[in-house]
Image (spheres, coloured by chain):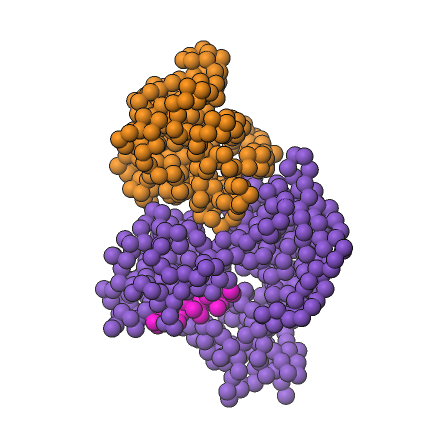
Chain colours: A orange, B purple
């Protein structure tokens, strides 16, 4: 199977999207599921949220963060990824929740947000509000990639107020919770705000599914790297999640474990930069 | 009069091999293999053969080696064993064929494992392959999992003429041979070569296919005449003590997958990293624990400890591996049980709490039972901990096949002919037993192939 890149677009200066041929993943995709990418034979197995599946292609939002995401950014339409595996994970059911609020502030959250909104809105009795926040104007995605076309109500926010409403999603969701019009929250993106949002929703007695991003290796339940502690019980983000009841997650452990390979990631980046200097 | 001592195996010197991931044994030369094979007294009723889970014709193979008929020896071994170069290296021969060798009574048993590895390596180097004439059948069999049980069952069924497709979740076939056993025990060129044989004979291997996730189990049931579930026991057991969430605490699976499957020892040339400290502790004393400890040593850890609640004399690890580990400077701390993992404010492990143990009675498996000694708690500094307590059956597949009968511990239930409660669905390997050896899983795969053939002919 050749996983050909059929589309590549910049979302802003730091994020890009690609469409990749992966019929095995596309045919079984459910909103909230993810897949594993291996870009080159020597590459890592990287978990990646799926924004949408159409025909035999799937779409990813990718942030230029480490070595792999930067290297992949230099690829062009027509190039092929080594492996695309999935879908994986056990997302929450698509059902009637009532007034649903989605929130996200980072690539992975935006992708899931889009996929879930699109399906939940089809269920009678659901009213879906999507909040996507970005640090500042230049970080905002092009309009067609935002959730304004797939949600009943869409709120764009920037932390400095340069575009849309001013604030992080936390600030905006607080007002909605205060107004008492929220039955269920879904959220993804950076982990520390997810912790804060979980604390906040608990205060208002509103349930929350939070995407607990953790480091995975095989992503099939074999390594235990992505262990998440739910009410003291060990679960695996790869097969039990990655969405969990945010009120029960041990967030401090999740935040701490996500940073385990930080120094190694920097080292990989340094080596890649050195190599690229040689190329030029 | 038979020579009592076996021809010694040349090995990489310990001080050298702890710096690389190359094979520890260097293999027999032709002359060495012939000399060793000639020690065999060719018993009228060989005791070695019934001890072999895949029932290899051990006596005949050794006879042919002794007479320099390496090709013939290889073809006889290949008849019963799809991957002889691998089993020659990783089987617990001392408990099987070699353990019951008559020569072992007065001297050393024949070095059967190393002789078989020699023959298979010789065949590979000389381009000798088995030529099979397959009488094609239209019947299709799906096999879930490309580990030892799955590949053995696949080869046997393919030889019988069936159309065989293996569905493998990972991006490489081999199961534990690929992700678990390190290259210094099982070189990857050997693994690649023996797995290529499957495709040569027409076994279709579908990598990256997770049955239950991107392929429906019901789809397989509709499209295939029989199914063999060899999903393995890949889920790690944890200690369930305080501190397991700390950074620097690994399951042996994670540590070994990073090193063996993802080649973290080649980081940053390969992308997957691994973190280890100067002082690495490994809980457990099976082969997986020793593999983890020896990998940590090779990665560059200064001190590596095996922390075990029994003594190494009653450890499940192979004697040869314990010996190799000791030569490599792995430190064995026996009769200690972990009580808690200690960490710092940044969430990194800094040490472990251990309780001394003593033996009291015998457990169900017939081993001395360790019990904790009161008020004997002590602490030990560590910056990495690897937990190697064994594994349980993979629940990813099972959770997607609720109609399948399982035991409470996750093992798949079958009858004597390895058939599950679902007609035409068979199971085997570690998914059935909960964790065993490569060769036992292979034996199971062979037996299942016969049962599947019988069921397809009904």
Would you say residue B447 sits in the magenta stretch?
Answer: yes
- Identify the residue at the far left of this view: B138
x 57%, y 76%: residue: B98
Camera-nearest residue between A104 and A19: A104
Q: Which quarter of the image is occupied by the C terminus of chain B?
A: bottom left
Picture coordinates of residue B358, whole percent (x, y): 72, 64
Q: Is residue B298 magenta?
A: no
Our reading of the magenta stretch's main secondary structure is helix
Is A172 placed left or right of B39 in the picture? left
| Outermost residue to the top | A162
List x then y, in percent, for residue B292. Answer: 61, 54
B123 horizontally vs B202: left or right: right
- Taking the spot 53% from the left edge, 45% from the top edge, the residue there is A233
- The residue range painted magenta reads B436-451
Q: Quadrant of residue B196?
A: bottom left
Q: In this image, B311 relative to A3: left or right?
A: right
Q: Residue at x 67, y 60 (%)?
A: B309
Between B38 and B24, the residue placed more toward the observer is B24
Left or right placement of residue A19 versus residue B345 in this view = left
Q: Is residue B269 above or below residue B2?
A: above
Q: Is residue B195 visible?
A: no
Answer above or below: position of A258 versus A166. Answer: below
């Amino acid at each position: 199977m050749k996983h050909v890149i059929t589309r590549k677009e910049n979302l802003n200066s730091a994020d890009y999207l690609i469409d990749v041929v992966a019929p095995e993943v596309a045919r079984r995709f459910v909103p909230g599921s993810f897949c594993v990418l291996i870009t080159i034979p020597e590459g890592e197995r990287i978990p990646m949220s799926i924004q949408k599946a159409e025909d035999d292609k799937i779409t990813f939002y990718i942030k230029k963060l480490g070595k792999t995401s930067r290297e992949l950014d230099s690829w062009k339409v027509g190039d092929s990824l080594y492996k695309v595996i999935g879908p994986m994970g056990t997302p929450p059911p698509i059902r009637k929740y009532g007034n649903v609020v989605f929130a996200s502030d980072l690539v992975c959250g935006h992708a899931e947000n889009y996929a879930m909104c699109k399906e939940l809105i089809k269920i009678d009795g659901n009213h879906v509000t999507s909040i996507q926040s970005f640090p500042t104007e230049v970080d905002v995605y092009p309009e067609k990639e935002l959730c304004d076309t797939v949600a009943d109500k869409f709120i764009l926010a920037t932390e400095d107020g340069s575009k849309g409403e001013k604030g992080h999603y936390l600030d905006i969701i607080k007002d909605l919770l205060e107004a008492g019009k929220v039955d269920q929250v879904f959220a993804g993106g950076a982990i520390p705000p997810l912790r804060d949002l979980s604390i906040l929703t608990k205060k208002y007695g509103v349930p929350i599914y939070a995407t607990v991003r953790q480091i995975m290796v095989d992503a099939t339940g074999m390594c235990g790297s992505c262990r998440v502690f739910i009410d003291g019980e060990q679960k695996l983000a790869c097969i039990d999640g990655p969405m969990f009841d945010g009120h029960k997650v041990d967030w401090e452990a999740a935040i701490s474990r996500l940073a385990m390979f930080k120094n190694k990631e920097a080292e990989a980046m340094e080596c890649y930069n050195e190599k690229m200097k040689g190329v030029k | 009069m038979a020579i009592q001592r076996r021809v010694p195996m040349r090995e990489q010197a310990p001080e050298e091999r702890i710096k690389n991931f190359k094979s520890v044994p260097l293999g027999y030369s032709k002359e060495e293999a012939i000399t060793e094979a000639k020690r065999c007294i060719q018993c009228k009723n060989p005791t070695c053969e019934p001890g072999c889970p895949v029932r290899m014709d051990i006596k005949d193979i050794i006879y042919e080696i002794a007479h320099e008929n390496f090709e013939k020896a290889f073809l006889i071994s290949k008849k019963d064993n799809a991957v002889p170069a691998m089993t020659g290296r990783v089987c617990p021969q001392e408990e099987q064929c070699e353990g019951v060798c008559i020569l072992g009574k007065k001297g050393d048993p024949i070095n059967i494992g190393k002789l078989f590895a020699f023959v298979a390596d010789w065949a590979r180097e000389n381009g000798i392959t088995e030529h099979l004439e397959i009488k094609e059948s239209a019947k299709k069999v799906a096999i879930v999992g490309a580990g030892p049980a799955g590949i053995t069952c696949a080869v046997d069924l393919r030889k019988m003429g069936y159309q065989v497709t293996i569905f493998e979740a990972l991006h490489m076939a081999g199961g534990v041979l690929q992700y678990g056993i390190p290259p210094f025990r099982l070189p990857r060129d050997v693994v690649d070569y023996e797995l290529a044989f499957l495709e040569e004979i027409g076994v279709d291997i579908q990598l990256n296919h997770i049955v239950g996730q991107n392929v429906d189990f019901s789809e397989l049931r509709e499209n295939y005449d029989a199914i063999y579930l060899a999903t393995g026991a890949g889920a790690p057991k944890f200690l369930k003590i305080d501190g397991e969430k700390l950074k620097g605490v690994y399951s042996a699976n994670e540590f070994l997958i990073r090193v063996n499957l993802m080649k973290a020892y080649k980081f940053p040339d390969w992308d997957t990293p691994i973190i280890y400290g100067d002082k690495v502790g490994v809980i457990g004393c099976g082969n997986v624990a020793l593999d983890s400890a020896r990998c940590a040593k090779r990665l560059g850890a200064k001190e590596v400890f095996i922390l075990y609640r029994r003594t190494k004399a009653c450890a499940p690890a192979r004697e040869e591996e314990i010996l190799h580990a000791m030569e490599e400077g792995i430190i064995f701390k026996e009769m200690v049980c972990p009580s808690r993992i200690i960490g710092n404010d940044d969430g990194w492990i800094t040490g472990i709490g251990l309780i001394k143990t003593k033996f009291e009675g015998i457990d169900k498996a017939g081993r001395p039972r360790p019990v904790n000694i009161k008020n004997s708690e002590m602490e030990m500094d560590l910056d990495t901990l690897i937990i190697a307590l064994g594994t349980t059956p993979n629940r990813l597949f099972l959770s997607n096949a609720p109609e399948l009968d399982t035991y409470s511990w996750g093992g798949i239930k079958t009858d004597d002919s390895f058939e599950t409660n679902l007609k035409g669905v068979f199971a085997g390997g570690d998914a059935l037993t909960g964790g065993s050896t490569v060769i036992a899983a292979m034996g199971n795969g062979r037996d299942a192939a016969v049962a599947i053939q019988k069921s397809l002919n009904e």
